[in-house]
Amino acid sequence: MPTSLEGQITMEKTPSYFITKEVPPRIHSMSPSVRLLVVVRDPVTRAISDYTQSTSKRKDTPSFEEMAFLNVTTGLVDTSWSAIRIGVYARFLEWWTRYFTLDRILFISGENLIKDPAGEMGRVQDFLDLKQVISDKHFYFNETKGFPCLKKSEGSGNPHCLGKTKGRAHPDISLATIQRLRDFYRPFNMKFYQMVGRNFGWP
């Protein structure tokens, strides 16, 4: 990581950090005072999105149900599939809390980033002890993508929107499959809510 000058904040983003067991001790060794931002979303939606991303690269991918269940008939969930495993957030958080107290970690709602990006970014600015600069006037909703776009500055004509790999239409997944996965994740979600002191409202 580059050295931050006085008045600067150095940021780095890699999605796999949160789910990689070797990362917490390495980051703590680098800087125990680092602040961590983790974006989480409904694990079922996250798994379907993960699957959608992979099928865009490989057209011969088995169906979502075939990937998600060891036995489709009994509904036995395949927790070895990464798309399912990643959504058990409480498990990974346990690794991090061995090295960092929860006041060093801000969990951001992926759903709120879409519905109320300014509100969620307000929490980020507070957490990082930054002046509240980003507000509603910096966002507009892109109906095509289904996500907000960021205006780099007020009145700017060149907003930043998500790239072409984001906002793909999800495949049709049966309600029975979705319900089975919701039932699977519910106890893990409850544990996660208790650990972080925030209910994200996932079904």
Image: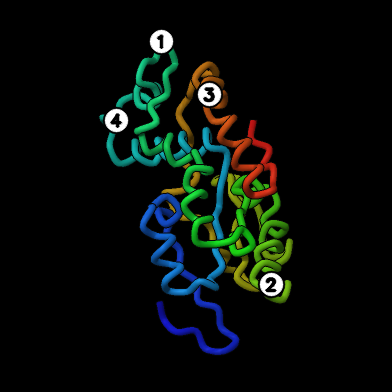
Percent from the top left, x then y, of residue 130?
68, 75
Ranked by sequence position, the earlier of labels 4 and 3 is: 4
Residue at the spot of label 4: 61
Q: Is residue 108 left or right of residue 80?
A: right
Q: Indicate the colouring scheme.
A: rainbow
Percent from the top left, x then y, of residue 179?
56, 21
Label 2 and label 1: CA atoms lie apart by 54 Å
Identify the secondary structure beneath mark 2: loop
Identify the secondary structure beneath mark 4: loop
Camera-side mark, 2 or 1 = 1
Q: Is residue 75 left or right of residue 101?
A: left
The quarter in which the C terminus is drawn is top right
Label 4 and label 1: CA atoms lie apart by 20 Å
Camera-side mark, 3 or 2 = 3
Label 4 and label 3: CA atoms lie apart by 19 Å
Q: Is residue 85 above or below residue 22?
A: above
User: As shown in the figure, which amino acid type bears the numbered disc 3?
Assistant: Ile
Residue at the spot of label 2: 154
In this orientation, which residue lies closer to the viewer: 151 or 63?
63
Q: Is residue 177 left or right of residue 1?
A: right
User: As shown in the figure, which amino acid type bears the numbered disc 4?
Assistant: Thr
Q: Is residue 150 above or below residue 72?
A: below
Residue at the spot of label 3: 178
Residue at the extreme front: 98
Residue at the spot of label 1: 73
Percent from the top left, x then y, of residue 177?
49, 20
